[in-house]
DNA sequence: AAACTGACTTCTC
DNA sequence: GGAGAAGCCAGTT
């Protein structure tokens, strides 16, 4: 990756940092906030590019159905789930309860 | 510049 | 309700 000043990817990081603790957002949601609804895949790419894990709470981003996907850091999904639980996010089995912990919801 | 990839989403069977 | 296939978007090679 080169030093592209600003880009879609960068904007995603900014949005991810805006997600309040104890809440989670979906890829589609971030994509829409980023200005391109439907670009959920691009969001995933941005997250995997994730330059600063502690600075970019990519673990607060889950699939539209609340399922935990990806997460290359730590032990993967296991760590991601742990982080969310630690922040007070409600879980529905292996999926996040977007009804209770969904951002803007 | 064109083609491929991927941490997604949604429809249909 | 679960599994499979198609579609979309931005980035990377």
Image (spheres, coloured by chain):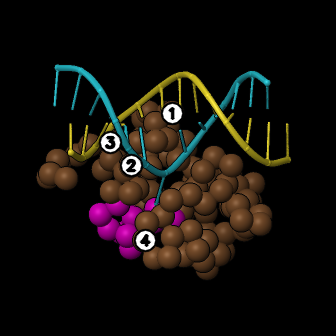
Chain colours: A brown, B cyan, C yellow
Question: Marks 2 and 1: same chain?
Answer: yes
SS class of the residue under badge 1?
A: loop
Residue A28 visible in image: yes
Q: Main secondary structure of the magenta part?
A: loop
How crowded pointer 4 is (Cα within 10 Å; few <14, some 14-19, many 20+) is rated as some
Q: Say which chain tag 1 marks.
A: A
Give above or below for A83 relative to A28. Answer: below
Identity of the residue drawn at 60% across and 51% down:
A63
- The answer to whether marks 4 and 2 mark residues whose Cβ atoms lie closer than 8 Å is no
Label whose residue precedes the other's in the sequence (1 or 3): 3
How crowded pointer 2 is (Cα within 10 Å; few <14, some 14-19, many 20+) is rated as few
Q: CA distance from mark 4 to mark 2?
A: 14 Å
Looking at the rendering, the stretch of residues picked out in magenta corresponds to A50-59
SS class of the residue under badge 2?
A: helix
Question: Marks 4 and 2: same chain?
Answer: yes
Mark on residue A8? Answer: 3
Identity of the residue drawn at 37% across and 70% down:
A53
Question: Marks 3 and 2: same chain?
Answer: yes
SS class of the residue under badge 3?
A: helix
SS class of the residue under badge 4?
A: loop
Label whose residue precedes the other's in the sequence (3 or 2): 3
Q: Which residue is mark 2?
A: A45
Label whose residue precedes the other's in the sequence (3 or 4): 3
The answer to whether residue A56 is magenta is: yes
Q: Which residue is mark 1?
A: A38
Q: Which residue is mark 4?
A: A73
x then y, percent, for residue A19: 51, 59
Q: Is residue C10 left or right of residue B1?
A: right
Label whose residue precedes the other's in the sequence (4 or 1): 1
Label whose residue precedes the other's in the sequence (4 or 2): 2
Give above or below for A67 relative to A84. Answer: above
């Amino acid at each position: 990756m080169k030093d592209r000043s600003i880009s879609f990817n960068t904007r995603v990081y900014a949005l991810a940092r805006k997600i309040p603790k104890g809440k989670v957002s979906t890829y589609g949601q971030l994509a829409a906030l980023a200005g391109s609804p439907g670009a959920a895949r691009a969001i995933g790419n941005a997250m995997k590019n994730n330059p600063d894990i502690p600075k970019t709470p990519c673990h607060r981003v889950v699939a539209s159905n609340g399922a935990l996907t990806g997460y290359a850091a730590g032990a993967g999904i296991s760590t991601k789930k742990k982080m969310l639980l630690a922040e007070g996010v409600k879980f529905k089995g292996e999926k996040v309860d977007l009804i209770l912990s969904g951002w803007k919801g």
